Amino acid sequence: MLDPLLNLVSWLIPIFLLAIFILPQSVRILREYERAVVFRLGKLLGTKGPGLIFLIPIVDRMVKMDLRVVTIDVARQEVMTSDNVPVTVDAVVYFRIVEPEAAVIRVENYLKATSLISQTTLRSVLGQAELDELLSKRDKINVTLQEIIDRQTDPWGIKVTAVEVKDVALPDGMKRAMARQAETERERRAKIISAEGEYQAAEKLVQAAAMIAEEPIALQLRFLQTMREISNEHNTTTFLPLPLDIFSPFLKSASDMKSRPAKPLADESRAAGGESK
């Protein structure tokens, strides 16, 4: 009775130990965002997952790949723009794996490779741009960087979704020069606006003078309106209004004297000589 039981136990213990060591290597559970690239005896078998997958111990080898978006900080780069201005820039690259097999087979370390190619592309693209374009058209530069990096990493099964230039550090001397330029530009705009205001005011004054010339009573109304405004602001001021008709004879005589032709000097000297005789 005991011998068969001992034989059974002797068989079950090795099987149990083998199951403990083999099952973890043969059964794997992958999450929704994970994929397994399986090699059997060194040859590519394919991609498996997500969920429960089975592997042959010792024969199969699995490389787990994450399909979520990966973020890489591109280290600060010293760049000389096309207009010979030294700047220091850094960027962020967002990418994800779309072909796990290509990311395993065609490149040794896709993270390092993508980071290095992002650095070289950043220096190359920004070196062809001017400083004003780098500061004002950053969206366009980001799109250009994204297209170039995506085209270069496409054979690796990597999709670059976005590239963003984070910071552009300028030398202190360039910052002061740009501040002076901006101040000068603001002063120029202020002078132009002031000149345009003077021009428009002059046009309105010419139109008002033409209207007053047609209707002289408008000048009297304007005079009364001005008196009212001053009386509201300065209550202690006393006004003594005078009718404009009082000055009409004086103005008329002055205009007659100006319009009267002057006698020639020769006639005056001849008249003076005749009187002396």
Image (cartoon, rainbow, N blue to C red):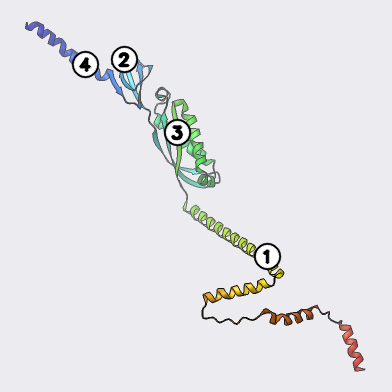
**Judging from the image, what secondary structure is the residue with disc 2 in?**
loop
Mark 2 neighbour class, 10 Å CA radius: few under 14, some 14 to 19, many 20 or more: few
Residue at 86% from the left image edge and 83% from the top image edge: 265
Q: Earlier in the sequence, mark 2 or mark 1?
A: 2
- The residues bearing labels 2 and 1 have C-alpha atoms spaced at a distance of 99 Å
Q: Look at discs 4 and 1 and give the one toward the viewer.
A: 1
Identify residue for label 1. 207
Give the residue type that dot 4 points to: Ala
Q: Nearer the viewer, residue 34 or 173?
A: 34
Q: Which mark is residue 19?
A: 4
Q: Which mark is residue 59?
A: 2
Q: Position of residue 83 (x, y in %)?
A: 56, 46
Residue at 50% from the left image edge and 33% from the top image edge: 147
Mark 3 neighbour class, 10 Å CA radius: few under 14, some 14 to 19, many 20 or more: some
- The residues bearing labels 3 and 1 have C-alpha atoms spaced at a distance of 62 Å
Q: Quadrant of residue 238?
A: bottom right
- The residues bearing labels 4 and 1 have C-alpha atoms spaced at a distance of 105 Å
Q: Earlier in the sequence, mark 4 or mark 2?
A: 4
Q: Earlier in the sequence, mark 3 or mark 4?
A: 4
Considering only vertical position in the picture, is 71 above or below 168? above
**Judging from the image, what secondary structure is the residue with disc 1 in?**
helix
Q: Is residue 270 visible?
A: yes
In this picture, residue 59 sits left or right of residue 6: right
Give the residue type that dot 3 points to: Thr
Q: Look at discs 2 and 1 and give the one toward the viewer.
A: 1
Quadrant in which the N terminus appears: top left
Identify residue for label 3. 161
- The residues bearing labels 2 and 3 have C-alpha atoms spaced at a distance of 37 Å
- The residues bearing labels 4 and 2 have C-alpha atoms spaced at a distance of 16 Å
